[in-house]
Structures are given as structure tokens and as C-alpha cells.
Amino acid sequence: MSTRRFEAIPAIDLRGGRCVRLVQGDFAAEKVYGDDPVAMARRWESEGATRLHVVDLDGAARGARSHGSVIAAICSALRIPVQVGGGLRDADSIAHVLEAGAERAILGTAAARDPAVVEAACARWPGRVAVGIDERDGKVAVEGWLEDAEIPSSRVAETAARAGAAAIVYTDIRRDGTGHGANLDATVAFAGRTTVPVIVSGGVATLDDVRRARAAFDGGANLCGVIIGRALYEGAIRLPEAVAAAAGGRVA
């Protein structure tokens, strides 16, 4: 029996204790969508989310966790699994997030710069570590997207596969927060080069993006979900409809 599953995953990006979205990862292009991340998390769960994606933007930029108490509050408030990234560079920071109640820790900069951290984390917490690969113009961005690493995404994906990562979150930074649509073709092509299930991220703008990603999944693409941010906050996508479309159901 197949265990393949495809999810529509709402995102909460944290900066200064608030829910924000950036455009193309630019910290100077920030829009605030709420002052109560826990209330926002509860909203997405009440609207049918089966998983929540949380990013500590301050932690990603600083290289250290910055929203530990907020993340713990979100995890304790929800029944659905939460995956968390941002500033997780070592075993202690990963342990803090997982012990706070997160189902998964997402490693980005560490995966690009210190593969041993990913391998050790996957061995210590099997099934609970994912890898984030954020690409901008063909280069992997690190340190909260403020720098480019001299390493191809294929090598980071090899690290994820070798370590046994639960998933890869693949983001096209040039699409992220723009509302111009997900770069699905590039993501599907990337997913075809790794054995680790891939989550589509960056630029999801309409319900059709979700449908197209689900259709690719149905066609055998190595995908397991799609992350939705700005489109939810601005009403371009309604989460119940996205969840239904991701599950393969018909949406009027």
C-alpha cells in the first residue's frame, strides 16, 4: 500500500515576534500580517491545515534561534505537526526546537556548509529532520538568504539523501513572496534528481498552482507538499480550498 501523501502547508514567517512576509528574501521588503503568531497558527489549523511551516527569520539571519518561546507556544497550541526552520545550525538548537514540540527541524545553512550536522541530526532524530534548499539564480543561499554558498543544490540534496532526511523544502527565492506563481517545472526537475520527497516553496499565488503541483504528484513526481504564504494572507487562496485541492479533491 502506498504511503505517498501530498499536503498544502500554510507558512508563518516570524520576525520581531510578528507574522511577516518578505519579497524575494529581502528583509527591507517586509509586510506585517499579524502581531499574534499563535492566533494565526490556530486559524490555519481551524481552516483544515494538516501541517504548519514556521520560519524564524531573525534566527536565520543571525545564525541562532530568536523565537524559541513563540515557537514553543505555537507547537503546544496545535494538534497538527509543525515543521520549523531558521537559525538551526547545531545539535543544541535542533534539540530545543524538537523538544519544544516541533515534529521536524529544517536545516538550511547547516546542510550547505556542514553536512556532518545533518547526518548526525538525522541519525539522532530519524524522520524528524528536513533540509531546506533555497536557490537564487542557480546558487544556494544561506544565512537567511543574505549570502550565496559556493555549493550546488545537487550536492546539498546528496547530503539530504545520504543522511536520510524526511523531506527537502525547495524554494526559488526569485519567486518567493512575489505572487508570480511557483516555479513548478524547476522544482519537479529537481525532485527527479533526488530520492528525498520535495516540498514546493516560493511564489505560490493561486489555487491553480496547488492543482498543478498535485497533478505533478499524481503523475509520479517526487513531491510531498506545497507551502503557501502571501497568497493566504492576502486572500488570493483560501486554505480549505487549497487543502482539498492538495488532497486530490475537486474544488468549485
Image: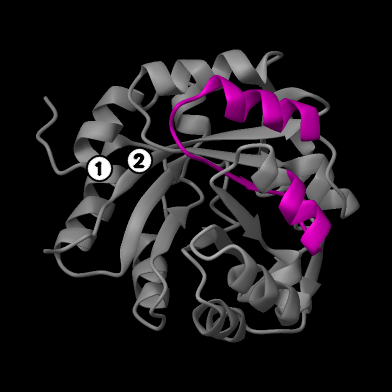
- Using a 10 Å C-alpha cutoff, classify the residue at mark 2 as few (fewer than 14 neighbours), some (14 to 19) or many (20 or more): many
- State the quadrant of the N terminus: bottom left
SS type, badge 2: strand
Against 182, residue 50 (above or below) is: above
Residue flagged by tag 1: what amino acid is it? Answer: Ala
- Image quarter for residue 56? top right
Task: Indicate which disc, 2 or 1, sits on the residue closer to the N terminus.
Answer: 2
- Using a 10 Å C-alpha cutoff, classify the residue at mark 1 as few (fewer than 14 neighbours), some (14 to 19) or many (20 or more): many
Residue under the point 81% across and 63% down = 90
- Image quarter for residue 84? top right
Circles 2 and 1: CB atoms closer than 8 Å: yes
The label on residue 8 is 2
Q: Is residue 81 magenta?
A: yes
Q: Is residue 137 visible?
A: no
SS type, badge 1: helix
Residue flagged by tag 2: what amino acid is it? Answer: Ala
Where's residue 77, x and y in %?
A: 56, 20
198 or 74: nearer the eye?
74
Span of residues in magenta: 68-96
Distance in Å between CA atoms under marks 2 and 1: 6 Å
Residue under the point 15% across and 63% down = 2
Q: Is residue 138 magenta?
A: no
Residue under the point 38% across and 67% down = 197
Task: Give the image's coloring scheme.
Answer: one colour
Q: Is residue 18 visible?
A: yes
Against 118, residue 75 (above or below) is: above
Where's residue 227, x and y in %?
A: 45, 44
Where's residue 133, x and y in %?
A: 59, 66
**Residue under pointer 1:** 246
211 or 77: nearer the eye?
77
29 or 197: nearer the eye?
197
